[in-house]
Amino acid sequence: MAKGTPMRSATSTDGHVREPLLEIRGLSVDYGIDDPVHAVVDVDLTIHRGEVVGLAGESGSGKSTLAYAVTRLLRDPGMITAGDAYFYDWPKGSYREDGDSLAPGAEANGVRRAEPAIVDLLSDDREAVRRVRWSEIAVVFQSALHALNPVLRVGRLLDDVLRYHEHGMSRQQRQARAAELLQLVGISPDRLRSYPHELSGGMRQRVMIALALALWPSLLIMDEPTTALDVVIQREILEEIMQLRQRFGFSVLFITHDLSLLIEIADTIAVMYAGRLVEQAPAKALFHAPRHPYTYGLTRSFPSLHGEKRVMNGIEGSPPDLRRVPSGCSFHPRCAWAMPECAATLPPMAELRDVSGTRSALCWLQDGQHRVPPELAVTPPALGSAAARPNMRGGSTAGPVRDDVAAAEEVPGHDR
């Protein structure tokens, strides 16, 4: 597998330095050998420090497979067939949410900015991957009931993580950290003696989040963590996640089939269909002005709580069988604007620039040579405008929150 060159920090359209944390290039994953199923095909995705990235799509689109591949948790018969994945292990305490970070290697007031250690997640060096997995990249799995060991108490589960990674901690220190972690996610420390089956679904999911945060990771991958919960508990957990994220400054890859959920919590949304990334854009821009017909269909598949009533039209048909993916654009059998070339040839990934910033769409209609339907040419909210995405409490996140380094000092033992 040929390896590419890792990217460097880039300046975003608002003038802030965007530092990469996880970079995925051309990733492809198959299941099986003789007649393989192409579950993930040529995916490019970059997550920056402090960013919340939503990964959306119908069931079977390859979202979870992508996450398990880059964390090397993919089980047989899954196999990575192409691509690169790099994790940027930045020095602890170097992240600033206000975006005034120096570019790597630059100097200001005599202080030189440290370079991150770059970890090749797809290399044969499994030990290098183990060093960053859970300590810097943590995963909240889809079903807490199946992810938690049913014969171990909650305290033992937390203690095992700390004992394996934090060799310098005494037993008393580990117990204190475990109690602190439960309190962070809204659970009383006396639940350390409970078994998973003695907890409610929401509490089990909070324990999973506590386990993921045990080592203060830089990246939290959440694989549909609230799917099986009722909407009230779902809301409470999501609010807690976003508060913790603002407090500690970690990045989030949030995987879900619920696009309406991502509109509120994500900075950037990437949409997958039949194993491919078909659109990526700022959250509000994607919601108000989608550029791919599939994304347009998703945004028209759930009702608004405000405004006039309108007829809801879902996407006709079903996602394709990955063993028999249609030729050309895999979405063309369900697309209202399909053209002859859509069935014949895979469209190029169109890089688009508008008032919302830079975005991309895998669609012939966006190649600059075709007439774009009005529905796919709506002007999005401008970057930095009052239409910035709302936070979980209905306010605005247009302005920066307090420095996460200062916030981290409030928690004993935390050094992000």
Image (spheres, grey):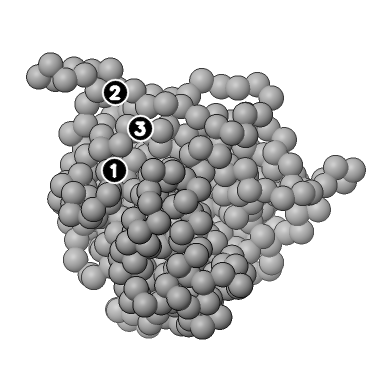
Residue 201: tell me if it is visible.
no
Q: Residue at image x 47%, y 51%?
A: 163
Q: Look at the picture and state if 299 lies above or below 97.
A: below
Give the residue at mark 1. 416
Q: Residues within 10 Å of mark 1 (few under 14, many from 20)?
A: many
Front-lying residue, 142 or 259: 142
Residue shown at the point (29%, 59%) measured from the top left:
244
Q: Which mark is residue 139?
A: none
Res 19 → quadrant:
top left
Location of residue 351 with respect to 316 vertically, above or below: above
The span from disc 2 to disc 1 (Cα, nearest Å) is: 15 Å
Taking 42 as reference, is 235 left or right? left
Q: Along the polypeptide, which appears first: circle 2 or circle 1?
A: 2
Residue that numbered label 3 is attached to: 90
Instruction: Check disc 3 and give the amino acid type.
Output: Trp
Q: Which three-letter amino acid code belongs to the residue tagged 2?
A: Ala
Tag of residue 114: 2
Cα separation between marks 1 and 3: 10 Å
Q: Nearer the viewer, residue 381 or 310?
A: 381
Q: Residues within 10 Å of mark 2 (few under 14, many from 20)?
A: some
Q: Is residue 148 visible?
A: yes
- Left or right, 145 with respect to 108, comes to right
Q: Residue furthest right?
A: 34
Q: Position of residue 50 (x, y in %)?
A: 31, 45
Query: Regarding mark 3 in the picture, which secondary structure is present there?
Result: loop
- Residue drawn where x is 74% and y is 42% of the image: 79
